[in-house]
């Protein structure tokens, strides 16, 4: 047997290729949208990629199951649990077997047993892997998807918070409690292979270790320590981070089936500022992917700065309007990866790309900029009310401590809340370190609030300089374990 691990740092997404070396057949578990890495690895190992499966309808990235099934002929094994609302609409397009709890299927001499493990989503399944070709008659590991992570379990509130399905958070938490009782009965030696690592918004405290064991999680995963269902539900729902806005879109895309990559329109390379302007005038949004400091010094009016880094897909998913065409300013060597990242979260309506270096030829009179300042330069102005301070951190960060007088507007919610920001004085934007508040500065300027200042070093530096702040201890969840 062969097992290969694939990890997309920008999405904190783990997927797996499992191959039977005796028969030369392989399957991908929880594939991302772009299959090239799986196909290359399979070929290099002398395997044929004949199947694909996923543990649930994902909310944080575009699944590659339809791509592998329709474009590459892989047989699909998809969940038939959770009721009609959670059935895959594209299953009939490819060779597909819908599976339920207790079902088994084979890829070569590898046996996969389906466990129904709802909680994170109603259709969630996990897969027990047994290497029959290697002589085993018991499973060696379990692919848990977003059910059990290293140090955490899947959040049950996404359907309510992201998709607006009322009452599903508590129902999901109770289903998760029941699913965990099933998990606890598994042998301690089983390896645990989850679909996400640290940084994913599908949980609140995922570990950075790629895999674990059932026994280790029983001993050290806080969620598995609860014996009282009510206490578990309260603790699991408490403190979950805000789900990115695009999660609701991904649920629909992955249930219906994403467009095949080969059918997406080519992206035009724009040779001039005039061509970019024409797209803007036709209704396209424009994001500038340069580092924040470059953007701050000079940028086109109306553009939004989402620097291309590890957090790029997250903030693009929060801030890009999926209904509008999109044009992108980027460095040429980064552009292919940027397009891949956008398509990984379903932003397919990308109509144009321009080399950001062309902005150097644009006169400063045609560009706008914003100022940056360090805390000691702004503390007096904040205290005197000469600037309006906006804190764009997450709710959990805000609850743990803040600068007196700040208005809290989480970055991802800013596009719909600009009317809440006073315009009679300069706006000082603040986050933990200055990175998110730089994105916020671009959003405000694009929305017509021009006099903005980014607090360099953010709340961290504010505290390091000994400036006034409110420390608020986070309340602990009550209940018996």
Image (cartoon, rainbow, N blue to C red):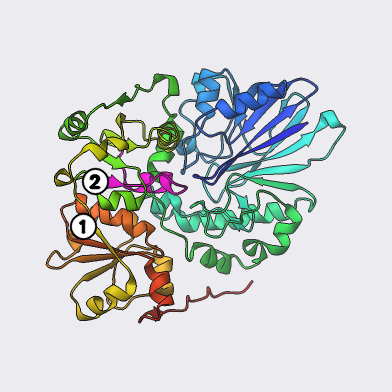
Q: Is residue 133 magenta?
A: no
Please identify the quarter of the rendering in which residue 313 is found: top left
**Residue 418, numbered label:** 1
Residue 49 seen by the camera: yes
Q: Is residue 318 magenta?
A: yes
Q: Position of residue 258 (x, y in %)?
A: 43, 29
Please indicate whether residue 445 sits to the left or right of residue 241 in the image. left
Q: Position of residue 449 (x, y in %)?
A: 17, 57
Spatial CA span between label 2 and label 1: 20 Å
Please indicate whether residue 300 sits to the left or right of residue 341 in the image. left
Q: Nearer the viewer, residue 127 or 433?
A: 433
Please give the residue where the numbered disc 2 appears in the rendered image: 299
What's the residue at 73%, 63% (across, down)? 219
Residue 98 seen by the camera: no
Q: Residue furthest left?
A: 424
What's the residue at 49%, 45% (across, down)? 10
Q: Give the quarter of the figure containing the N terminus.
A: top right
Q: Residue furthest right?
A: 135
The crowding category of the residue bearing disc 2, from other C-alpha atoms within 10 Å (few below 14, some 14 to 19, many at least 20), is: many
SS under mark 2: loop
Q: Nearer the viewer, residue 373 or 113?
A: 373
What's the residue at 55%, 27% (across, down)? 35
Q: Position of residue 467 (x, y in %)?
A: 36, 80
The crowding category of the residue bearing disc 1, from other C-alpha atoms within 10 Å (few below 14, some 14 to 19, many at least 20), is: some
What's the residue at 46%, 44% (across, down)? 60
Q: Position of residue 372 (x, y in %)?
A: 28, 62
Ranked by sequence position, the earlier of labels 2 and 1 is: 2
Q: Which residues are magenta?
A: 304-322
SS under mark 1: helix
Please indicate whether residue 340 sits to the left or right of residue 137 in the image. left
């Amino acid at each position: 047997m062969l097992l290969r691990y694939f990890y997309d740092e920008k999405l904190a997404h783990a997927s797996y290729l499992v191959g039977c070396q005796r028969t030369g057949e392989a399957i991908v578990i929880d594939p991302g949208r772009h299959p090239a890495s799986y196909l290359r690895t399979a070929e290099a190992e002398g395997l044929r990629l004949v199947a694909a499966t996923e543990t649930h309808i994902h909310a944080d990235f575009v699944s590659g199951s339809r791509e592998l099934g329709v474009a590459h002929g892989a047989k699909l094994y998809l969940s038939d649990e959770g009721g009609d609302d959670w059935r895959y609409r594209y299953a009939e397009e490819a060779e597909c077997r819908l599976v339920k709890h207790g079902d088994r299927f084979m890829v070569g001499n590898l046996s996969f047993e389906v466990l129904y493990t709802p909680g994170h989503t109603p259709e969630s399944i996990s897969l027990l892997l047994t290497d029959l070709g290697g002589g085993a008659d018991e499973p060696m590991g379990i692919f848990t998807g977003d059910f059990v992570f290293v140090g955490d379990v899947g959040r049950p509130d996404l359907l309510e918070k992201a998709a607006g399905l009322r009452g599903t958070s508590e129902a999901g938490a109770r289903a998760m409690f029941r699913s965990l009782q099933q998990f606890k009965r598994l042998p301690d030696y089983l390896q645990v292979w989850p679909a996400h690592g640290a940084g994913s918004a599908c949980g609140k405290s995922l570990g950075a270790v790629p895999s674990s064991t059932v026994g280790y999680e029983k001993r050290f995963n806080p969620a598995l320590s609860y014996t009282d269902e009510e206490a578990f539900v309260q603790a699991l729902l408490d403190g979950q981070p805000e789900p990115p806005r695009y999660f609701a879109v991904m649920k629909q895309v992955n249930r219906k089936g994403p467009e095949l990559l080969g059918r997406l329109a080519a992206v035009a390379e724009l040779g001039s500022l005039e061509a970019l302007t024409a797209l803007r005038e036709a209704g396209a949004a424009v994001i500038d992917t340069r580092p924040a400091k470059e953007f701050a010094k000079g940028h086109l009016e109306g553009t939004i700065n989402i620097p291309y880094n590890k957090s790029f897909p997250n903030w693009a998913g929060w801030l890009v309007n999926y209904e509008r065409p999109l044009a992108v300013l980027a460095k040429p060597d980064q552009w292919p990866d940027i397009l891949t990242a956008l398509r990984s979260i379903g932003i397919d309506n990308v109509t144009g790309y321009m080399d950001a270096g062309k902005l150097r030829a644009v006169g400063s009179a045609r560009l706008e900029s914003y100022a940056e300042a360090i805390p000691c330069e702004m503390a007096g102005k904040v205290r005197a009310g000469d600037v309006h301070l906006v804190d764009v951190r997450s709710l959990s960060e805000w609850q743990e401590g803040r600068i007196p007088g700040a208005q809290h507007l989480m970055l991802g919610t800013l596009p719909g809340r600009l009317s809440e920001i006073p315009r009679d004085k300069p706006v000082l934007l603040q986050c933990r370190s200055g990175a998110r508040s730089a994105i916020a500065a671009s959003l405000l300027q694009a929305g017509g609030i021009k006099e903005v200042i980014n607090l360099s070093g953010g709340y961290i530096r504010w505290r390091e300089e000994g400036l006034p702040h409110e420390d608020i201890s986070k309340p602990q969840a009550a209940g018996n374990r």
